[in-house]
């Protein structure tokens, strides 16, 4: 089990990432509502978003927040519900973080470049 200082830092990172996620989810949902109300097609949305560095940065921040937040939550669940060693728990955390980062960045890079294909 990690020391109290490490646990405090992990707790702080969990809360900071939750705050960032809250803002990102609000912006993301607002944009979905805006797009649906205006009757935009998927192709129109991709055209507006692709190649736009501001949206790329926004979704990169979103992905980074998820990659911090979710593994810490899974770590907490694993610590409370299983008898896994700290090493195993940290390996699972690292693997989950890596999967989120790879899948997330593949998605936004694809979206960023998609406008050229339309």
Image: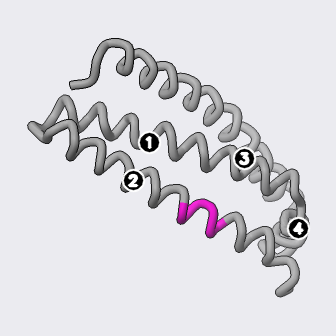
Residue topped by disc 2: 96
Instruction: In the rendered view, tell whether residue 92 sits above or below residue 75.
Output: below
Residue topped by disc 3: 28
Which residue shows up at 66% across the image and 40% down it?
Answer: 25
Mark with earlier residue (2, 4): 4
Depth check: give the residue in front, 28 or 84: 84
Q: Magenta stretch?
A: 102-107
Distance of label 3 from label 1 (alpha carbons): 18 Å
| Residue 103, magenta (yes or no) | yes
Element under disc 2: helix
Element under disc 4: loop
Mark with earlier residue (3, 1): 3
| Quarter assignment of residue 83 | top left
The answer to whether marks 2 and 1 mark residues whose Cβ atoms lie closer than 8 Å is yes
Which residue shows up at 79% across the image and 58% down it?
Answer: 36
Residue topped by disc 1: 70
The colour mode here is one colour
């Amino acid at each position: 089990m990690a020391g109290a200082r490490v646990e405090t830092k992990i707790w702080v990172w969990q809360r900071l990432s939750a705050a960032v996620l809250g803002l990102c989810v609000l912006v993301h949902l607002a944009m979905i509502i805006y797009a649906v109300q205006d009757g935009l097609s998927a192709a129109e949305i991709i055209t507006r978003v692709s190649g736009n560095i501001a949206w790329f940065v926004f979704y990169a921040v979103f992905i980074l927040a998820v990659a911090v937040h979710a593994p810490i939550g899974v770590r907490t669940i694993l610590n409370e519900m299983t008898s896994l060693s700290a090493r195993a728990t940290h390996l699972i955390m690292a693997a989950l973080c890596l999967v989120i980062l790879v899948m997330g960045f593949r998605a936004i890079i694809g979206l960023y470049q998609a406008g050229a294909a339309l």
